Image (cartoon, helix red, strand yellow):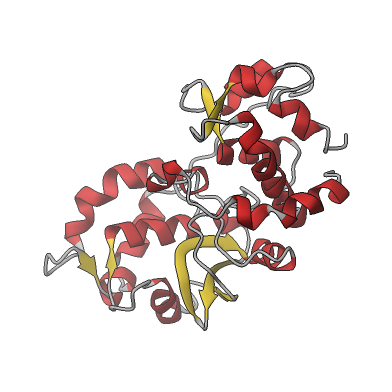
Amino acid sequence: MLDLGYASQALDGFQSSEASPPAAEQRQSVAQEHAECPICFEALPSAPTAVLSKRGHRSCRHFFHVQCIAAMESSGIKCCPCCRAEFDGNLRIPNVEAEPQDWFKLVDFNGDGALTVQEVMEVLKATLYIDVDRMEQDLPSRFAQWDQNNDGKIEFNEMMGSNGLFYYVRDSFRAENQVSTIIPSIRRNRHEWFRYWDEDSSGTLDKEEVVRSFVKTFKLGTAPDQAQCLHALVSLLWSEFDPNGSGAIDIDEFCKPNSGLADMIIANLGS
């Protein structure tokens, strides 16, 4: 459990410390890569999902669990943690099969009545339990089958009709049961823990990777207020361990006994 007394101080500085987009913002975020909510890092389809809004219109392209948006709002956060777009509310994603037209209208970000392949992949990752890697590899080359006029977009009937793209993705890219692995103990073997979460074997972890690993290690996904405090805490501490602003820290900076980032974060976590 986070020490909320200390974490509340972190929340006070959270928005200012996150005011500038990170250098790596051009790539997909870790949460997007795994089709997870950027706050709790649980699968997006596992709970009611929403988008951020301002004056009744979508603020940005990112998807969150409804309860995680509530945690952000209760913490005073007024901008998207992924892209910094301001928001003052949220719009819940309708059930795609029960309310397909309302669903399509909401996920059509620019309101032009059509979706690009990128928009399709973004929303289906937030809607369905699918094999994301297979879809991202195969769908772009197959998209033209539904893009009848070859304009790079598909309309509602092409998406949701009886032979629509939605049903093809739902049925063709079902997620396989994955064998769960045991997360190494961060208290007993921090180097092994670090390497476990360094999924691309880069030798470093960026800020989002660090937050995601702690959320999953300490099972904070079902406590969005705690997860939000952890986001703020890591942001507050980050510059001390990444003084050159590279956006990532290496295994020594993380694991250094008594003064590494691991110790600093664990000091604010209970058993």
Q: Is residue 6 left or right of residue 109?
A: right
| Whole-percent x, y for residue 236 in the image | 68, 44
Position of residue 64 measured from the top left corner of the image (x, y, whole percent):
57, 61
Q: Nearer the viewer, residue 157 or 185?
A: 185
Residue at 12% across / 64% down in the picture?
150
Is 47 placed left or right of 227 in the picture?
Answer: left
How far across and down, in percent of the image, does residue 93 sit? 52, 72
Relative vertical location of residue 50 with respect to residue 245 in this rendering, above or below: below
Q: Quadrant of residue 66?
A: bottom right
Q: Residue at x 70, y 22 (%)?
A: 184
The residue positioned 61% from the left and 67% from the top of the image is 78
> The C terminus lies in which quarter of the figure?
top right
The picture places residue 111, in percent across and down from the top left corner, at 33, 78
How many labels sit on residues? 0
Farthest residue in the bottom direction? 55
User: Is there any visible trace of residue 163 in the rendered image?
Assistant: no
> What is the quadrant of residue 235 in the picture?
top right
Above or below 124: residue 249: above
Q: Quadrant of the N terminus?
A: top right
Q: Residue at x 36, y 63 (%)?
A: 166
What is the residue that sits farthest to the left in this orientation? Answer: 149
Q: Is residue 114 visible?
A: yes
Of residues 202 and 166, which is closer to you in this image?
Answer: 202
